[in-house]
Amino acid sequence: MRISELARRAGVPIGTVKYYLREGLLPPGELTAATQARYSEEHLARLRLVRALVGTARLSIAETRAVLAAVDDPATSAVDTIGGVYKALPDTAQGNQPDLAPARAHLSRWGWPVDTDAPALGYFARALDALGAAGFDTPDDLLDRYARAAAELAEQDVADLPTASTAETVRFVVIGTLLLEPVLLSLRRLAHEGASRRRFPREKD
Amino acid sequence: MRISELARRAGVPIGTVKYYLREGLLPPGELTAATQARYSEEHLARLRLVRALVGTARLSIAETRAVLAAVDDPATSAVDTIGGVYKALPDTAQGNQPDLAPARAHLSRWGWPVDTDAPALGYFARALDALGAAGFDTPDDLLDRYARAAAELAEQDVADLPTASTAETVRFVVIGTLLLEPVLLSLRRLAHEGASRRRFPREKD
């Protein structure tokens, strides 16, 4: 297909497609004339992935490039991809390294691996730091139920990963891990509104 | 206390404190001389809240101002604050209005209020859109377990809200809703790494 059809099918402006091509997030098409290239279904799939990362997951171009590098690495595995993707994310990649001891103490209480070098450990530690800095007391039982919910979701997510082909596994990891985060947060916010309306009913409710 | 002590106790550079003062995120101190002002414990609490919103929750100055306006509204209630805070968040405040029908269909299946105008509804609808655009199939049972987890967490969060004073309720709502989001996401990521290591063990593991 031509670039115009590629853009239309992905629901992306042509200018954006050209920008992704220039930035190397999308591989070049097959040249059919000096100024014309042809694109495949694989280009379309990649374009949709880039769109999801930049648009929904709100990654920068550099972060998207890092995630795609993890995805494209031929030596990759599902485990490495999860690590590579999370390492490329803004929340874990920037900021000062916080004190990891309180985070590790919680992991230990839950029987999770404490010696992990997972990028999410720093993210968790920074989240705890911020709660403390804001003067918010986080009792163990609060964190315990968040950990329990996270573990149940993650266990089933990983059990659902398709393994017929590495490419498919990796696509599921990237999309499933990143794009389900806004699903989880938006549902929690909706549930907060519902629960607080039940607890604090107003006249008009 | 002087501005230097305020900054030190909040762990924020003095220049940043002055910036927040100029932007009106922090109320001015009580003038004790032409060029000197005194700050109270309330200033410190507010500064920590601003720091948490701008630093951890990654809100822009304008978004932080909108959240604080919801918090400071004397007519506010816990329910209104949750709505006001969520309305001010970037994820829900920007982007085209998506098709809400699929999102409402899911809420209906869960017995959640379908006629809600909660800002999180648009956020949820956009999250579903993005999954679809990325070619990711989201079967009902996947969304069902995310909804169940979100509802359980939210129900307990709201049950835990202190109600002795409105100010304290509101502070809990703002900090608890926003700052527990990174806790939830980071724990899910840690759990993903753990679950995938168990399912796909490597030699060195």
Image (cartoon, coloured by chain):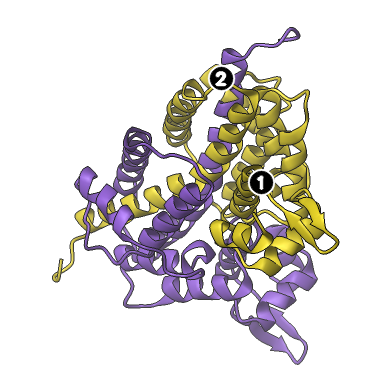
Chain colours: A yellow, B purple
Q: In the drawing, what numbered circle is on residue A172?
A: none
User: Left or right: where does residue B103 sit relative to residue A11?
Assistant: left
Inter-mark Cα distance, 2 to 1 = 22 Å
Tell me the quadrant of the picture where the N terminus of chain A can be found: bottom right
Residue B47 in view, yes or no:
yes
Secondary structure under the numbered disc 1 in the rendered image: loop
Q: Name the residue under label 1.
A: A40
Which is nearer the eye, A68 or B172?
A68
Asked whether the residues under marks 2 and 1 belong to the same chain, the reply is: yes
Q: Position of residue A185 (x, y in %)?
A: 45, 49
**Visible residue check, residue A137:** no
Q: Is residue A194 left or right of residue B2?
A: left
Quick one: label 1, few (<14), some, or many (20+) residues within 10 Å? some
Query: Is A140 situated above or below A64?
Result: above
Please report contact status of discs 2 and 1: CB closer than 8 Å, yes or no: no
Residue denoted by label 2 = A164
Residue at mark 1: chain = A
- Give percent across and percent down for residue A81: 68, 30
